[in-house]
Image: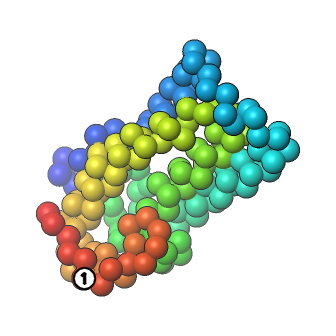
Amino acid sequence: MTDSDRPNVIVFPPVILAATIALAVALQYLLPLGVLVRVEPTWRLVAGGLLLLTGVLFTIAGARTLFRHGTNVSPTRPAIALITDGIYRWTRNPMYVGGGPLMFGLAMIFALDWLPLLMIPSWLTLHFGIVKREEQYLARKFGEDYQRYLAQVPRYLGPARATHTQKT
């Protein structure tokens, strides 16, 4: 494995999730906003539980598909294969998509008002520091196959744009 045979991500992705949650907990303790705690607990727990479950299912589905094909899950290791089936038919980044509802679910369950607010810089860090770099790497490694995949499957959720071109 050469050093160039992996995405040049700025940090291991779960670190972004963990740091965002830890900062939200600290800010909630130091400077509580008191918004989510006003929501009736049963509704908060049910909605939060459903969101958390959705996020976990996206993440597990993405990881299982990668494992099934024998490629690396971690972007700190080389991609062995371009995966385009399973959940990867609907989103190119199911594990990152799963992080959103997972964090919203935690925010609801534990009334962490700061967590949805911190998700904005967290998402920007993920998008530019992880996802865009992974895309550049995959375009170099898988060429035309990856270009076709880009045209067919959205980065996160929603419709793919057939006119999309990848800049390397």
**Residue that sits furthest to the right in the current view:** 42
Residue 71 vertical placement versus 12 (above, below): below
Residue found 72% across the figure and 47% down from its top: 48
Q: Position of residue 92 (x, y in %)?
A: 41, 67
Task: Look at the image and tell me whether residue 60 can be seen.
Answer: no
Q: Nearer the viewer, residue 67 or 27?
A: 27
Residue 135 falls in which quadrant of the image?
Answer: bottom left
Q: Position of residue 36 (x, y in %)?
A: 69, 36
Q: Position of residue 91 (x, y in %)?
A: 46, 70
Residue 155 vertical placement versus 4 (above, below): below
Residue found 43% across the figure and 43% down from its top: 120
Question: Which residue is disc 1 drawn over?
Answer: 163
Which residue type carries mark 1?
Thr
Specify the quadrant that holds the C terminus: bottom left
Residue found 53% across the figure and 75% down from its top: 86
Residue 161 vertical placement versus 52 (above, below): below
Local crowd size for mark 1, using a 10 Å CA cut-off: few (<14), some (14–19), many (≥20): few
Q: Locate residue 4 relative to residue 86 in the image: left or right.
A: left
Q: Position of residue 99 (x, y in %)?
A: 53, 50
Q: How many marks?
A: 1
Q: Locate residue 68 relative to residue 44 in the image: left or right.
A: left
Residue 76 vertical placement versus 58 (above, below): above
**Residue that sits furthest to the left in the current view:** 168
**Residue that sits furthest to the top in the current view:** 30
Task: Look at the image and tell me whether residue 154 can be seen.
Answer: yes
Q: Nearer the viewer, residue 83 or 161?
A: 161
Residue found 61% across the figure and 46% down from its top: 104
Element marked by disc 1? loop
Residue 32 falls in which quadrant of the image?
Answer: top right
